[in-house]
Image: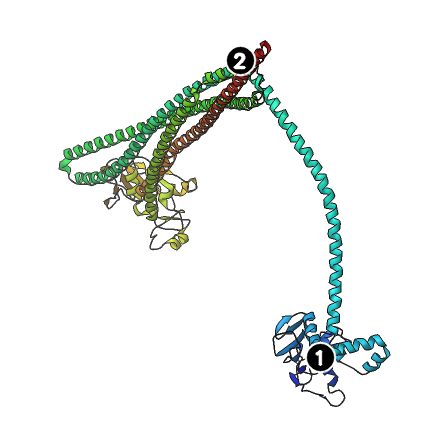
Amino acid sequence: MLSAIYIKGFKTFARPVRMPLEGGITAIVGPNGSGKSNVTDAVLFALGEQSPGVLRAGAMGELIFSGSESLPAASAAEVTLVFDNASGEISLPYAEVSVTRRISRAGETEYRINGSRSRLADVRAVAGEAGLGRHSILRQGAVDAIVAGGAAACRQALEEAAGLGVYRRRRISASRRLERADDQLEKSRQLESELASQLRRIQTEAEAARRYRELESRFRELSLAHLYRVATRELGDLRGRLRDAEAGVRSLEGAEREIRHGGEEIEGRLRDLAAGLAEAERRAEALEDATEDLRAENLRADRTLLRLESGSGRRDDRRLVISQLRGELERTTQKLDGLQKRAEALAAERDAAKDEARGREREADLARRKSSESGGERSRLAAELDGLRARLAGLSAEGRGEGASEEDLARLRGAVAEVEALGEDQSDVRARELATEAGRAAGRVGSCFEGVSRRRGELAAAVGRSESRLRRMRAAEPASEGTRLYEVVRPRPGFEAAVEAALGDHGAGVLAENLDEGVRLLSETDPVALRLDAEHAGGDGPGRPLLECVEVLDGRYAGAIERLLGGIFVVDRPAEGARLNGHVAVTTDGLRLTRTSVSMKSAAGNFARGARLEAETDLLEALKNGPGEALYDLRDGIQSASERLASASEELQRLRGLSERASRARSSLQAQAVRRLASAEGARRRLLEREREAGELTEG
């Protein structure tokens, strides 16, 4: 029984409304337009009515409250019918069952039974069990339509009112399912008939296939017997090929010995090169130390010379010191010449080692080609032995006969003897030995490669130390926007101290185009700026112009450098610069003489620092392009030799596998031949016994 109606947002019901329905008759009264008919429309809406016309609306969206002056429009319309199931008319285990339909402005519709989503068919089934449906709503003129519709309309109305409509609908649904089941049964019978005809055809084809397999098996046996007879005639050719293969294996052994000898020589060359590299590194370090010692000794000599010149009574001591310094300089020069010759010898040895390694590579390539040719021959022999093994299996057809002739027995005995004569192939043992030797050679090549890698690591460490020193020297250079004088001027050999004494702090000065730019470039780190527009200082000096003692590195500054160095001269003795008349004189020992003063400049100045920076850069390039390049080439050569040796090892391994396969085939062939011979001899004995029995019966 319908116990309550809940309406929210449906037509004129803007606010939620709950209308309880008690037992008996419930009347809803009110003026026209108050929404009495909307209650019946709400019941039809909840029962799943899909026609907007039946619900007195132009579209389903018009069923949602559209708003008024005081109330906003609703977003959805929702109607819930509550049924009292105390009597158990509805087949749900609840005392109260609610049916809800909700529609949104987006056109989405959902149905719920007791709050759970459900289908429209389920909602109509629950309403039908409760005796509620479209027939329960009688609008104006509905009674006249039933009476005018005749007996069928009256019967349908009475069935719906009595609650029998749900069963009628179930009967119609069951009838439709029975019709579909009958159609499926008929299709199954047709499919069974088709499968039966196909089964008979498949059975016929299976019988034909079985007969074909029997004939094919018989044909294969006869073919194998024929092939065995042909194989026995080809055994001589196989022996010759085996002898050729053994000769190829022996040639491979000789090539392997040559490769091993070449590997040993390469190892010796590697050791010599490593020792030469270590010696070169040691000599380079000693040369650096000696250079630093010479610089310090030169400074001490300059100071000693200055003291000697200040005292006129000690000229003999001064000559002695000068001679000692010259001797030390000659010894240092000889050491440098020796180091240079040693470096040239090492370079020659490296080139010879490269040529020898290339020769060994060509020999290894030749040996590998020979190994490949021998491997192909071994493959062909193995294939032919497999063919013999297959052909021998065909003797089973002949072994089943009891009438083997003397010729067949002799042929079988000869085959067994030939197979036994093959014996164990000595090349198998030698192939294993070659594989073992190849493994040892690969290990030695790996050791050489590790040694070269270690030397490369040591060289990389030396390069790293040189780069670190170079970075420190460059970091000590003051930062500046422009170009400095010592960057475009280089003293010629023997005049380093003279140039350093002549220019002094001006050597680190920044080059400026004019006075204004020079003033702008001055700072705490750059206290000196040299004007490139300076005028030339004319006049003849007491000695050689300083411009002739330097080398201009950048031709753009040649004219400016000539003007900057004008008025500075180099003299052999300090006494020559006694009268300078405004010029500046310097000596090769570092003395600076002016009209009013004499001073001593340390040799470790800007130009010396630039020279050390350039020497360190040259040393770094020599390390990278000299021993480093040689080690890289040597490592590549060893790696290439290792790859070729690995390829030769793989080829030997493949030959060994083929040899083992041929040995297994030979053993199987021998066993089968022995079995076939025993079977044939047994058949021959049985035949002789039968002939003897037949002769006895004839005599009796």
**Labels 2 and 1 touching (C-beta < 8 A):** no
Q: Is residue 216 left or right of residue 677?
A: right
Q: Quadrant of the image for the C terminus?
A: top right
Look at 78% across and 81% down and name the residue there. 138
Sequence-first disc among 2 and 1: 1
Give coordinates of residue 665: x percent, y percent.
49, 24
Q: Quadrant of residue 305?
A: top left
Query: How crowded is the residue under tag 1: few (<14 C-alpha within 10 Å), some, or many (20+)?
Result: many
Between 310 and 243, the one lying in front of the other is 243
The residue where tag 1 is placed is 43
Q: Is residue 479 above or below residue 670?
A: below
Q: Secondary structure at mark 2?
A: helix
Give coordinates of residue 439: x percent, y percent.
39, 29
**Exactly how many numbered labels are in the figure?**
2
Amino acid under disc 2 = Ala
Q: Secondary structure at mark 1?
A: helix
Between 161 and 239, the one lying in front of the other is 161
Q: Quadrant of residue 93?
A: bottom right
Give coordinates of residue 75: x percent, y percent.
66, 76
Q: Residue furthest front?
A: 700
Query: How crowded is the residue under tag 2: few (<14 C-alpha within 10 Å), some, or many (20+)?
Result: few
Q: Quadrant of the image for the N terminus?
A: bottom right
Q: Is residue 262 above or below residue 196?
A: above
The residue where tag 2 is placed is 410
Q: Is residue 562 above or below residue 7?
A: above
Q: Quadrant of residue 333?
A: top left
Residue 567 visible? The answer is no
Between 397 and 141, the one lying in front of the other is 397
Give coordinates of residue 400: x percent, y percent.
57, 22
Q: How are the residues colored?
A: rainbow
Amino acid under disc 1 = Val
